[in-house]
Each structure stands twice: as structure tokens, then as C-alpha cells.
Amino acid sequence: MSGTMTIKLKVWRQAGPKAPGKFEEYTATDVSPESSFLEMLDVVNDKLALEGKDPIAFDHDCREGICGMCGMMINGVAHGPSKLTTTCQLHMRSFKDGDSITLEPWRAKAFPVIRDLIVDRSAIDRIIQAGGFISVATGSPQDANALPIAKPDADEAMDAAACIGCGACVAACPNASVSLFTAAKISHLGLLPQGQPERYRRALSMVAQMDLEGFGGCTLFGECMAACPKGISIDFIKRMNGDYIWGAISERPEKITLGSG
């Protein structure tokens, strides 16, 4: 078939969380450059199923770059070589005929492997849950202009809310830090009037849960921002740290130790 590619795959296979894992090699033939990366894997899996072999397990759902499920390391890069792109949005035209591609799951203590390329990312769900609730009035919705919000604040909140929780920031960080994700979730509420009543308590609770989950500390390598498919800025980490410090002072002054002299 003209205009198609042959791709060599080196895929991490692991039957379960406690099972030993290893790389296995496959060949994907007649790959259309216009197919998505996950469509290519679908074809490989169809072939494996016909051969009576176990298909490659990988996460996916919406396939529209919205849900954040499709994360995997592609040649050592979270979500692959294209910037601001999730794995499901990556097209095979980003590769060349005869290329070798290595696929691995996210590598982080807080993201244990479930099977093959699927990891347990429930730790980031628990960080969100630690944020609790926001104090908003119930009943009929307010008019759109009843709660004035400055456009720069609204724009910045929307930038933070763009985070899809895929975990690429953790996978890309040398420390396996989840600070960018946590900062985005703290900031998109902390920038709006609705999020003010619990703003500092939310920062304290979510950062505490982040530490409990076993993620590494942030040393501002910036790899998280480079790998983020939504381009979340590390400036939000600065904002999170500020909210955390102010929360520690205002909410839990007994935790603050003042130096002598």
C-alpha cells in the first residue's frame, strides 16, 4: 500500500502491579501517516488478538485531548514529540517510515503500574478531593454579570482550569513532583470570588495530600511545563506556594516557628 509506513515498537509489558515487567517488540505495518497514535495501537492490538496474544493495555477515553487518560511515555517524552498535544491527538505523520518507538508507562512511585502502559493515577484524584468544596449560593443561577470578575483574573483562572489531570507533569519531572497539577487546581478556584472563603485552607489541605501521596518535591526544573499538553505555566506553582505560606500563617499560626534574634 503506497503512502504508508512501517513502525517498529518496543513496548513495556507488565501483567500486574507486582508482576515483573519487560519490553517486547512488535512491528506495525501499513500505518497511515494520517492515523492517530492510538489508532495505530488499535491496529496492533487487533493483530495480536487474531494471533491469540494479549493486546497491549493502555488508557484512553474521549480521544479528543480532553480527559487526560491517554498518557504514556513515547521515546522518553510524555505524550510524545509534539508540543501541546496529548497522545490521542498525536498523529503518525510525526514519525518516519522505519522509525523505532519505545512506549513506557508513567514512571513515578505515586503512579504504580496496573498493567502494561496503564498506571493508577487515583493519587491525583485524592488531591482534588482534599480541596473540599467552595461556598456558593444554592438555588437559581445568578445572572452572568451579577458577580463582576476582572478579565485578567478570569483569563488566568481559565488558563489554570485547562489542566486535564493527565499526569504528564509528574512523568516528566526528575523529582516526580505533582506541583504543577496541584497548583493549577488550587489556582483556578483561588483566582475567582467563589473560591475565596476556603482559599488558604484549600491550599493547606491539597499540599498536605500531595506530600502524603509520595510525590517528589518541586525544584523548578520546568520539565512539567514543557511536557504539559495544555501549556500550564509554572507561575501557578509560585501562586500555590504563596497561598500555602499565607494559609500556614493565618489558618495555623501554631505551626509557625519564629527564629530567635
Image (cartoon, rainbow, N blue to C red):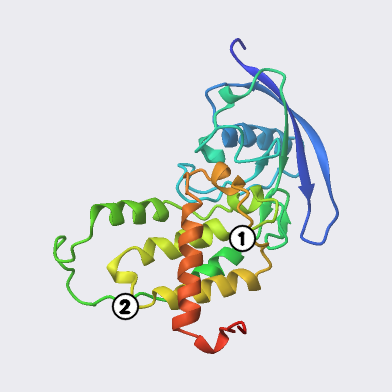
For the view shown, which residue lies furthest in the top direction? 2
Q: Check disc 2 and give the amino acid type.
A: Ser
Q: Quadrant of residue 188?
A: bottom left
Look at mark 1 in the image and give the residue it sits on. 121
Counting the numbered discs, the total is 2
Dot 2: few (<14), some (14–19), or many (≥20) neighbours within 10 Å? Answer: few
Dot 1: few (<14), some (14–19), or many (≥20) neighbours within 10 Å? Answer: some
- Give the side of residue 74 with respect to residue 251, left or right: right
Image location of residue 77, percent across then percent down? 66, 39
Q: Residue at x 63, y 70 (%)?
A: 211
Taking 19 as reference, is 135 above or below it? Answer: below
Compare residues 251 and 102 and report the one nearer the observer: 251
Q: Quadrant of residue 136?
A: bottom left
Q: Residue at x 45, y 75 (%)?
A: 246
Q: Check disc 1 and give the amino acid type.
A: Arg
For the view shown, which residue lies furthest in the bottom direction? 254
Q: Quadrant of the N terminus?
A: top right
Q: Quadrant of residue 208?
A: bottom right
Q: Residue at x 83, y 58 (%)?
A: 19
Please tell me whether mark 1 sits on a helix, a strand or a loop.
loop
Q: Which mark is residue 135?
A: 2
Taking 102 as reference, is 239 above or below it? Answer: below
Image location of residue 49, percent across then percent down? 71, 39
Q: Can the viewer see residue 187?
A: yes
